[in-house]
Amino acid sequence: MFSKAAKVLQFLSEYAQDLWLTLRYNGYSPLVERNRRQFYKLIIETHTIEKGLSLPRRRTLFGRDKVRFVMSALDAYEPDFSPLPAQMALGALDAYLRFHREQGIQDPLLDEVAALLARWQDRQLELRGGIKPYRFEGHDPAGPVAWLQSRSSLRMFDGRPLPAETVRQVVTLAQSAPSQCNRQSTQVHLYQDRATIDALLALQGGSRGFSENVGNLFVVTSEIAAWGGPGQRNQTYVDGALFSMCILLSCHALGLGACPLNLAVTNAVERRIKVAGGIPTGERLIMMIAFGKTVDEPLRVAASPRRSLDEVLHMHTGTVSP
């Protein structure tokens, strides 16, 4: 009974610490620096304009209030913090204006958009938001299926640090990961120093037997400031997990071995990992990923059989009774 009561108390303690961290660093907190809050707010609201422009049937002059908010937020934003939200907003507003001008529509709102774009021309920022054409690339239909099914968690690394350009390529490919409202809150911390890797893996505790051969280690995190409100309390982990999966697939595509390492740790251990890795307090840990080139010998991976499809797939094809 004492053991069960202790576990209940630990649950309460951990959730209380989670609550404090969320209240302290979420996107509504006045304790978070203004530029960081505006960074995410401008991206989120701009993305609603992009979604409206990407619909099959676009309403004219849709989202008036949203457009005016984005213009106001853009004028209040400092691009020196990061040019991305400004580039995204300018691109979306430019696409919004062109969509209406091509149809010969006149409205005071469009004149306001045109005036704002003219004011920002001197900043010489690349227009990166809006919409873009897309088409499915042709491929061997059997290829992608076999490739996806061939991915496994590899632990047989050669231990050598990868060149910076290879690491950058891995993360660049992973940036195709979906992100709620294009927030892009995920951060990736790379470690190649032996002492730091050993310290981080010791805190993680799940790499015994191969940790000494890990020459490249990612710690994937997500900024709490990207999220606000109780409904978004778990989205930090959803976005971070999607990005992490794309890192694993990126490594697979580049012929690198990779092994995800869970961070199911207490808040106290999370704080120690952040200190050891120089990670800001306002980021939540998602997972570690050991990766690199593999040894020149036959590779082995865990069989890890999967559940029967019928245990996983539930096809609700008819009317669901309440």
Image: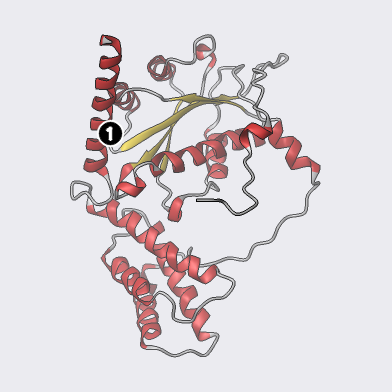
Task: Find residue 289 and report its horizontal and vertical position in percent.
Answer: 50, 27
| Image height of 107 relative to 14, above or below | below
Could you tell whether 184 is left or right of 215 in the image? Answer: left
Q: Residue at x 35, y 26 (%)?
A: 277
Could you tell whether 110 is left or right of 243 in the image? Answer: left
- Figure quadrant of residue 298: top right
Residue 81, can we see it?
yes
| Image height of 210 relative to 147, above or below | above
- Residue farthest to the front, as pictured: 321
Q: Residue at x 37, y 73 (%)?
A: 67
Q: Decide which of 252, 307 is in the foreground and name it.
A: 307
Task: Find residue 70 and report its horizontal and vertical position in percent.
Answer: 34, 68
Q: Residues within 10 Å of mark 1 (few under 14, many from 20)?
A: some
Q: How is the image coloured?
A: secondary structure
| Image height of 242 relative to 156, above or below | below
- Residue farthest to the left, as pictured: 30
Helix, strand or loop at mark 1: helix
- Which image quadrant: the N terminus? top left
Task: Find residue 91 and report its horizontal and vertical position in percent.
Answer: 46, 68
Residue 125, can we see it?
no
Q: Decide which of 93, 10 is in the foreground and name it.
A: 10
Q: Which residue is drawn at 48% across and 66% down?
A: 50
Could you tell whether 48 is left or right of 25 in the image? Answer: right
- Figure quadrant of residue 187: top left
Task: Find residue 171 and report its horizontal and vertical position in percent.
Answer: 52, 40
**Residue at which label 1 appears:** 18
Could you tell whether 153 is left or right of 241 in the image? Answer: right
Q: What residue type is labelled 1?
A: Asp
| Image height of 180 relative to 234, above or below | below
Number of callouts: 1
